[in-house]
Image (cartoon, rainbow, N blue to C red):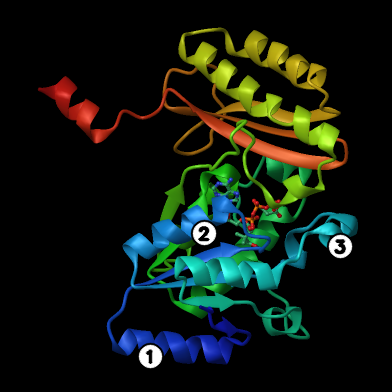
Amino acid sequence: MTVPIVRTVAELRATVAAWRRERLRIAVVPTMGALHEGHLSLVRAALEKADRVIVTLFVNPKQFNSAADLAAYPRTEKEDAAKLALIGAHMLYAPDGAEMYAAGFSTTVSVIDVSEGLCGAYRPGHFDGVATIVAKLFLQTGADLAFFGEKDFQQLHVVRRLARDLDIPIGIVACPTVREEDGLAMSSRNVRLSPLERKAAPRLSAILFDVSERLSQGAPVGDTLLAARQAILDAGYASVEYLELRANDDLSPLQSADRPARLLVAAWLGDIRLIDNVCVRPEPDAETVASVAA
Ligand SMILES: Nc1ncnc2c1ncn2[C@@H]1O[C@H](COP(=O)(O)OP(=O)(O)OP(=O)(O)O)[C@@H](O)[C@H]1O
Ligand SMILES: CC(C)(CO)[C@@H](O)C(=O)[O-]
Ligand code: BAL
């Protein structure tokens, strides 16, 4: 089994046009490759909701803040294609840099507000790079639906705002974070952790879950987050960039967990930057709302 690999916008458009003539529903799953179960969960979710699923693979230089991080980013296209073929994706769209950014490329898509603070504060220009490439991928594929992981929670908000503000007719679907058995959020960068760092890594999610529980029971936000920062450092992390409570729906800063919220963190383990987030006071699901109303 193989998955067709498409390298050019022209070939992508020709295939999409043929699918459109058959009135097929098309989904896109943007990635930077080095696919793991987190990515595959997005592809499976897309396969459930659409007739054709395009997975994109482009290590986007415009969203990296450091040349070393870009150079070290894992590139495993052959293995990625094999994984996608196995689960039945319909296309791997893997353009090269010149196809995406032709000579003289001069446009930046910049989403304000939701891109400020959190990762936006520590990775200047990052979300401009993300918004620019995601806008291109949406317009190139013309997909009906796009699937993103909650692991990159701020990115999810940026992409939703981008589609809304630019009237791009695409539904953004959020998928839950997939974790290793020990709780570590799956990430392509995890392979760069040393064995010792990999052992320490899951303390981050354990602390997040613990703090989330305490905040939803009314623990004071300031003191609880201060103690949690120290606990992350005690677990072997070199530094904590941010550990913040934000509103689930618009990412505004919160001083108390009196509405559905997210606890978001970025921390360095050795020279690897890890991010994670968990919900605090999850939104009641439709069934709970119905039973309370009854
Ligand atoms: N553990 C995960 N669970 C669910 N979705 C994920 C997970 N990891 C990544 N994704 C999603 O996959 C898509 C592509 O992400 P990306 O290729 O950057 O992978 P990554 O593992 O997040 O890599 P890295 O964070 O090291 O750049 C994004 O929508 C991202 O949110
Ligand atoms: C959305 C994305 C593929 C854009 O390059 C990237 O930011 C990612 O992998 O999350
Ligand atoms: N998952 C977000 C991609 C990045 O770290 O650049």
Q: CA distance from mark 2 to mark 3?
A: 28 Å
Identify the element where label 3 is drawn. helix
Q: Nearer the viewer, residue 111 or 216?
A: 216
Instruction: Locate residue 188 relative to residue 137 in the image: left or right.
Output: right
Tally the marks: 3
Residue found at x 43% / y 59%: 44
What is the three-letter code of the residue carrying label 3? Ala
Q: Residues within 10 Å of mark 2 (few under 14, many from 20)?
A: many
Q: Position of residue 66 (x, y in %)?
A: 86, 55
For disc 1, the marked residue is 18
Can you tell which quarter of the image residue 278 is in?
top right
Instruction: Locate residue 251 relative to residue 22 in the image: left or right.
Output: right
Q: Position of residue 187 (x, y in %)?
A: 67, 47
Dot placed on the residue nearer the N-terminal end, 2 or 3: 3
Q: Nearer the viewer, residue 210 or 255?
A: 210
Q: Residue furthest left?
A: 294
What is the three-letter code of the residue carrying label 1? Ala
Q: Nearer the viewer, residue 244 or 32?
A: 32
Q: Position of residue 59 (x, y in %)?
A: 72, 66
Q: Residues within 10 Å of mark 3 (few under 14, many from 20)?
A: few
Q: CA distance from mark 2 to mark 1?
A: 27 Å
Disc ID at residue 162: 2
Instruction: Locate residue 235 relative to residue 24 in the image: left or right.
Output: right
Q: CA distance from mark 3 to mark 1?
A: 37 Å
Does 293 sit above or below residue 148? above
Residue found at x 74% / y 15%: 231
- Nearer the viewer's eye, disc 2 or disc 1? 1
Disc ID at residue 71: 3
- Nearer the viewer's eye, disc 2 or disc 3? 3
Does 270 sit above or below residue 36? above
